[in-house]
Image (spheres, rainbow, N blue to C red):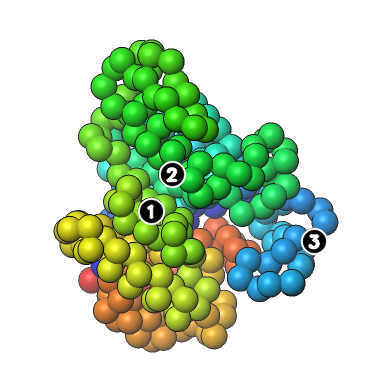
Amino acid sequence: MQIGIGLPVSGNHASPDALKRIAQRAEELEYAAVWTFERVLRATAPMPVPGREGVVAPLPDVYRNVYDSLDALAFVAAHTAKIKLGTSVVDALFQSPPQLGKRFATLDQLSGGRVIAGLGQGSQHTEYIATNTPLKRRGAGFEEYLHALRAVWGPDPVRFEGRFYKIPESNINPKPVQNPMPLLIGANAHAALERAARLANGITPSMRAWEPVEHNVKAFLAAARALGRDVTQLQIVARLNTAPNANPQQPFGGSLEQIQEDIARAKAIGFTQVFWDMNWANVSIDEQLQWMEPLRKLFE
């Protein structure tokens, strides 16, 4: 299992200098990847809490300031040479397939083929309103989006005719360096996990508790096996919105000794990579840098 790190693209400590310092230290320590996520806006009104029916609460403060996911990675690409550049996740539906496909392909070209494209459907209805995206695009529309995106990354001429998306026969360039581009899906519902098993190279769950994530990983791998896929080639990359000693009750949020036990459990489940996004715990950049080497040693 590999280790990654969430870049400081959000919260109080996000800055160009912070991005460069974390990314370059991660490359120096041979981390597998650096990761970003997307937030179009932070609604000021309380919003429904995912997974807690009927519960509303203010959105996290970390959403008050969020850099653009791909622009931040392009900046980091210019200051690194080999570390992978991942999104966990970009909300695909808020851009057209040609627009987002070109952005990912450009980043893959600029970085020399280092991109891992993690995509999701988006969870905040206010972002659907702000981007003029119909909620009916979720589900079947997202699946069609993935087919259109693969077409954009495929050979010219590109042409796609679907229910939700249409691309007239066109030349769309640049193409990604990687063929195929690694594609991960943020998925929780059964239908989304089955879709990822058919169409993606893996999933990127957000780790809040063991049981639901363990259930979803098993469901994803079972669906992939049923389709005849080689599950040893699939990726399970878990996002950890915490930091060491930040929350001992949360997976990967306790002491280094607890984290070592968590790593063993994650390996047994089938995780291929975990990455800490310590900005969610409002950890300073200097403290994040101090944690990076002790965490890396746990993976040796």
Left or right relative to 65: residue 17: left
Inter-mark Cα distance, 3 to 1:
31 Å
Q: Earlier in the sequence, mark 3 or mark 2?
A: 3
Where residue 195 is drawn, which disc sits there? 1
Give how far across and how far down residue 109 sits, in percent: 32, 28
In terms of secondary structure, where does tag 2 sit? helix
Viewport quadrant of the C terminus: bottom left
Give how far across and how far down residue 297 sits, in percent: 30, 72
Left or right relative to 193: residue 12: right
Residue 268 against residue 128 in the figure, above or below: below
Left or right relative to 4: residue 233: left
List the residue tagged with mark 2: 143
List the residue tagged with mark 3: 46
Q: Residues within 10 Å of mark 2 (few under 14, many from 20)?
A: some
Residue 31 against residue 138 in the figure, above or below: below
Q: Amino acid at mark 1?
A: Arg
